[in-house]
Each structure stands twice: as C-alpha cells, then as structure tokens.
Amino acid sequence: MPTYNKLVRDRIPEIIEKTGKAYKTEILSNDHYELELKSKLFEEVTEYQEATSDNEALEELADVLELMHALAKIHGASIEEVEKVRKEKADKRGGFDDKIFLIEVED
C-alpha cells in the first residue's frame, strides 16, 4: 500500500472508498494542521511554477486559493479580510500590473 503522509482535500477518503480500496487517515491537531497547510501551500506553488499550460496554471492557482481560505481561517480571519488587507497594500504600494523589476537603489 503506497504511503502518502500528506494533507488531502476533505472528500478524498470518500473518493478512495468508492474505488473499493482500503485507506488510513487521521485527524490532525490544530498545530499539525497549520504546518501541513503551509507544506501543502509550498507543494501547490511549486506545481504552479512547473505548470506548462494556462489550464494547468489555473488548476494550481485554484489549489493555492483553496489553501489561502483554510489558512485565513487558521489565523482567525476570512478570505474577505485577506482581500481587504491586499487591497489596502495595493492602494498604498501598488500591485504588480506594471511589471516593474527593480535593479538597484543608490545608497
């Protein structure tokens, strides 16, 4: 039986069960859950960086966004609150639309 040892989406056990395969899961403590969310975020960002098509990229970005929802909850917030902070930062410092790449700044 393959070993995965990773956080999976909530319906994965149900999907595995429908195939008739046996599986083993556990419910994580809050601290372990937060660590696994961070690890999963890294995994999904890496998969986004390795995407070779727009469709693949969008799939991975959707996974990143799902993780952002879960991480916002861990920190006692909602994705709407995260969006508010993002908007405030964009208003103060701008976004990334202009594709500006800073080379150096004089001391």
Image (tube, helix red, strand yellow):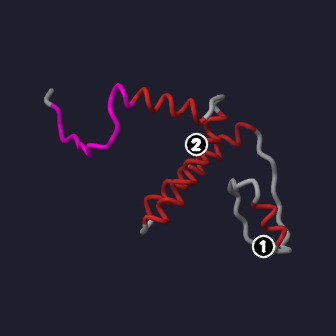
Residue 17 position by quadrant: bottom right
Residue 59's x, y, as percent? 54, 60
Horizontally, is 49 left or right of 19 in the view?
left
Which image quadrant: the C terminus?
top left
Q: Residue furthest left?
A: 106
Frontmost residue, 2 versus 83? 83
| Residue shown at 57% from the left, 33% from the top | 80
The amino acid sitting under disc 1 is Met
Frontmost residue, 106 versus 9? 9
Mark 2 neighbour density, 10 Å: few (under 14) some (14–19) many (20 or more): some
Residue 45's x, y, as percent? 49, 53
Magenta residues (range): 90-105
Q: Which residue is mark 2?
A: 68
| Residue 27: image tag | none
| Residue shown at 64% from the left, 43% from the top | 35
Which image quadrant: the N terminus?
bottom right
Q: Secondary structure at mark 2?
A: helix
Relative to residue 15, is residue 91 depicted above or below? above
User: Which circle's residue, 1 or 2, is located before the other in the chain?
Assistant: 1
Residue 15 position by quadrant: bottom right
Horizontally, is 18 left or right of 48 in the view?
right
Is residue 97 found inside the magenta-colored segment of the image? yes
| Residue shown at 58% from the left, 42% from the top | 68
Relative to residue 77, is residue 15 depicted above or below? below
| Residue shown at 35% from the left, 25% from the top | 92
